[in-house]
Structure formats: structure tokens, C-alpha cells
Amino acid sequence: MRVASLLPSATELVAFAGAGGSLVGVTHECDYPEPVRGLPRLTSSKIAAETMTSREIDAAVGGMTDAESLYALDADLLERLRPDLVVTQGLCEVCAVSEGLVARAVSRLPQRPELLSLNPTSIEGVLNDALRVARAVGAERETALKVAALRERLKHAGERIRSVPERPRVACVEWLDPPFSAGHWVPEIVALAGGEDVLARPGETSRRMSWAEVAEAEPEVLVLMPCGFGVERVLREVGGLAEDADYRRVEAVRRGEVWVVDANSYFSRPAPRLVDGVEILARILHPDAFPDPPDRRDALRLALAGRIG
């Protein structure tokens, strides 16, 4: 089978099913597992996001019309790769090529491959999508065992959480300037990690906010997880937050409980590594129950104007 993946989480799910060798094309953002970095790139971004600030990216995205897409799809390359299966998504047009654009491109292919669209809004939805992808590539039995192992890890984390006396109030922010609440599966991750999300409820979409609103929610822990950013990418911008008076009013900032996490790997993508995200956040929120601290590449604690963790 020949598989074209048009979003990073789908690439991870195909590899999770043991079918990474079937991938013939991926997106420009696909970076995990390592071997996919050498595959043909079917998409490109219309903005130079790597060299732009959060504010500049938000302005560029906001300036696009409804008819425009943030990404370009190389339909000619897609045809040359002759996929039997194309995996796409309809959840977020800011995160990947739109479902409509992909459907139009696939409809013009002479071989008419199967089109599989993934739209999870919860961890359960992600695990179900892992089985859907596995079914499409003929690896359902093996993947079911892997999914069961993920469920067991979540169960184990939950058992340790039950012994903690309190659940801290947590604010997860998926963009820095302007701040956005982290929705979809993130509130569920917070609950599974033993916290109370004060900005969103499970399944909700993210929403634009102000730092004043974040301060009013009185979070004891603030987690900065800009969509698609790793720790080092966040650190390039986080210093500017200290200049915002409303940011400085946030209770978690005053407590020194501001964390930067690798959202790109463990929180933004609806893929199996969300389970790692639960474990990372549990270590942040409950260090007594989870004595091994998170790896510094995965999570760092910040002071008001710099790094302390």
C-alpha cells in the first residue's frame, strides 16, 4: 500500500500502526518519527512562520479570506506518488491543509485513492482514529494491542492521581500573542493529570482571550503550549510577556509556576504521544506523586523574566 499523509498526526498514526514504510509523501511539518523527514513534501506554508512572532503569525492568518488556505498542496506531486490511501483532517484549517482542498485534489487523481479524514476532539477520539488508520493499512490487530497499552498507561496515571489531596487550578494557553485558551483534548489532559482547567472544558474549541481574562481565572499553574511550538521556540518569545501588566497579575506568574512545554510533540497533535503529555503534565502538577521530573526538553519552569526550572 502507498500512503500519503496530509497532517503530522496522521503520519504519526500510520507509523504507530507499523506502516511507516508505506508512507510515500507527507507534509512540510511532519517530523516524527525521524525517518519521515526524508520523504517527499506534499505541502508548504504560504507564510514564513519560523521567522515570525506569534503576533505576526496571528495577523497573517487573520488577514486571509475564507476562500484562502494557509497551506499549498502540490497536486502534481500527489499524482506522481500514486497513493492508495490519502489521510487528511477537517478539524482545523490553521493546522493543516483543508479537507475541501484535499478532496478536490483527490477527485482529480486517475487512480482515485481512498480518502480518510480524521477529526478527533478527545483522547478517546485519537485512540479510535489510531484503530481507523490501522484498519485502513491492514494492521488493526497489532495496533489494538498498542492502543490497549496506551489505555493502561492512562489508567496507571489515574491510580496515582487518586492519592493526591488537591487538584491545582490550571490555565493552558495555546498561543502567546494574543493568548488563546487550549481546547479540544487539552482540558481532558489536565483532568487526567490531576488538575482543574480554568479556561476551557473538554471538547471545546480554543478561543481568543486577553491576559486580563487569564488573570481573572486565578490559575495556580500556567502552562504555555503554543500550537506547533517546541520549548526552544517558545523561549524565543516568552521574555516579552513580562512587559505585560495583566500577565504579571496572573496568580501562577506571581507564584513562579509558569511552565513551557513541547506542545508540538505532546499537546497540539492528536496522536498517541498525547499520553506522554498526560504524564508530563502530571509530573508538573504533582511532583510528590510523580517524583521523576519531566525532561527539560519537554517542560521548563519559568520565572517572571526567565528560566528557573
Image (spheres, rainbow, N blue to C red):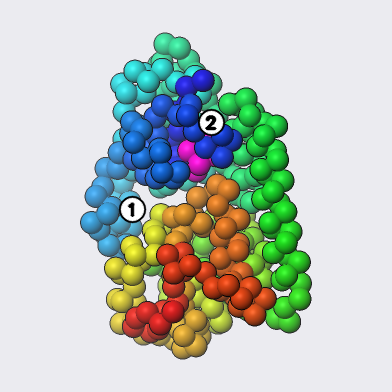
**Is residue 136 inside the magenta stretch?**
no
Please give the range of residues in magenta: 9-14
In the rendered structure, which amino acid carries the disc numbered 2? Ala
Q: Is residue 75 above or below residue 149?
A: above
Q: Is residue 72 above or below residue 127?
A: above
- Mark 2 Cα shell of 10 Å, populated few (<14), some (14-19), many (≥20): many
Q: Residue furthest bottom?
A: 254
The residue wearing badge 1 is 62
In the rendered structure, which amino acid carries the disc numbered 1? Gly
- Characterize the magenta stretch by its predominant secondary structure: helix
**Is residue 10 inside the magenta stretch?**
yes
Q: Could one spot residue 120 in this view of the protein?
A: yes
Give the quarter of the image for residue 77. top left
Tell me what residue is drawn at x 42 percent, y 11 percent: 110
- Residue 199 position, x and y percent, is 56, 69
Tell me what residue is drawn at x 64 percent, y 60 percent: 188
Tell me if label 2 and label 1 are in contact, CB under 8 Å: no
Position of the C terminus, as image quadrant, is bottom left
Tell me what residue is drawn at x 54 percent, y 48 percent: 270
- Mark 1 Cα shell of 10 Å, populated few (<14), some (14-19), many (≥20): few
The residue wearing badge 2 is 19
Q: Is residue 95 left or right of 188 when viewed as pictured? A: left
Q: Could one spot residue 224 in this view of the protein?
A: no
- Residue 94 position, x and y percent, is 40, 47
